[in-house]
Image (cartoon, helix red, strand yellow):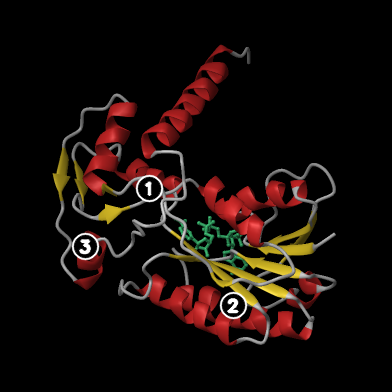
Amino acid sequence: MIRTLVTGATGTLGTALRPRLTAGGHAVRATSRSPPKETKGNLDWVELDLIEGTRIRSALENIDVVIHTATAPQGDTAAVDVQGTKRLLKAAEAADVEHFLYPSIVGIDDIPFSYYEHKAVAEKAVEESNIPATIVRATQFYSFIAELLDSVAKLPVWPLPTNVQIQPVDVDTVADVIVDHATLTASGRTDPVGGPEIHSVGELAQTYRAARGLRRPIIRFPIPGKTMTAFRTGQATCPDHRVGRVTWEEWFAERYASEVDETSSRVQSPT
Ligand SMILES: NC(=O)c1ccc[n+]([C@@H]2O[C@H](COP(=O)([O-])OP(=O)(O)OC[C@H]3O[C@@H](n4cnc5c(N)ncnc54)[C@H](OP(=O)(O)O)[C@@H]3O)[C@@H](O)[C@H]2O)c1
């Protein structure tokens, strides 16, 4: 049985990975700063803050494979994604970990956005470490796009960088690919994982608006600079690697249907 540590185990990708790894026969240890919501079963969970570096050694005890999904895109990415990754790599090397698997993002070399620049530095640290490694780059997750659109949904008009090109993917596809690589043999840099379709943000917003039955106008909000130029010219996409099968329309219809179901069962259930 492969003993696998998942950092960032409560995040979007970490949450998708845990049941898949367990079903695949891994003994999973999960880490993050706060525990996962569901604590059913014998969850092996270690509280770990990559900034402070506490508990890294105990988290890595008797571990064969590390899947390092912890990240802080809205926080201190230099401290978590760069220094935290380097700290984890050093400790993993000392703990004789056999394989370090690192999820990353398509296009980070060509998009001058500070989070992406920090991810690129972290990738380099992973490659330069003495632990055999696998780096799997993916495009933006549908849930991330949905969160962005949720954040403008209540505005009377939606100001969006409508001509930005992305190729979002469902997180389950990315998790499946990562679990396939979660063996004792490292694969180096793998093919990137993208969704089935490339869309502009304007198109994604229109699908979202229609699925929610909303009528707010979508207006183009031009954001100047090299970062947006890179997104506009498709640097965040991987057209030759359309791995995901679920489209944005299908994903969103399912997400919204389950939200409607939850709301109606809350309304109907006696208090
Ligand atoms: N989201 C996307 O669209 C996307 C697309 C392509 C690739 N990726 C990559 O996939 C990986 C996972 O992304 P995600 O979207 O699943 O991330 P996420 O949902 O933001 O989850 C981040 C995880 O990191 C943990 N974390 C944050 N700060 C920490 C710290 N100081 N110490 C220890 N743990 C910490 C969080 O838990 P606590 O806050 O409880 O610690 C959480 O479990 C990342 O490498 C990301 O770059 C993401």
Residue 150 appears at what percent x and percent y? 36, 41
- Three-letter amino acid code of the residue under disc 3: Thr
Q: Helix, strand, or loop for circle 1?
A: helix
With 214 as the anchor, is 104 left or right in this view? right
Q: Is ligand 1 closer than 8 angstroms to the Cβ of mark 1? A: yes
Mark 3 or mark 2, earlier in chain: 2
Where on the image, by quarter, is ligand 1? bottom right
Identify the residue at horizontal 70%, vertical 54% (top origin). Answer: 35
Say if 203 sits above or below 9 in the image.
above
Mark 1 or mark 3, earlier in chain: 1
Identify the residue at horizontal 68%, vertical 82% (top origin). Answer: 131
Asked if disc 1 and disc 2 are in contact, CB closer than 8 Å, the reply is: no
Residue at the spot of label 2:
84
Mark 1 or mark 2, earlier in chain: 2
What's the CA distance linking mark 3 and mark 2? 32 Å
Which label lies toward us, 1 or 3?
A: 3
- Three-letter amino acid code of the residue under disc 1: Ile
Q: Is ligand 1 closer than 8 angstroms to the Cβ of mark 2? A: yes
Say if 215 sits above or below 20 in the image.
above
Residue at the spot of label 1:
145
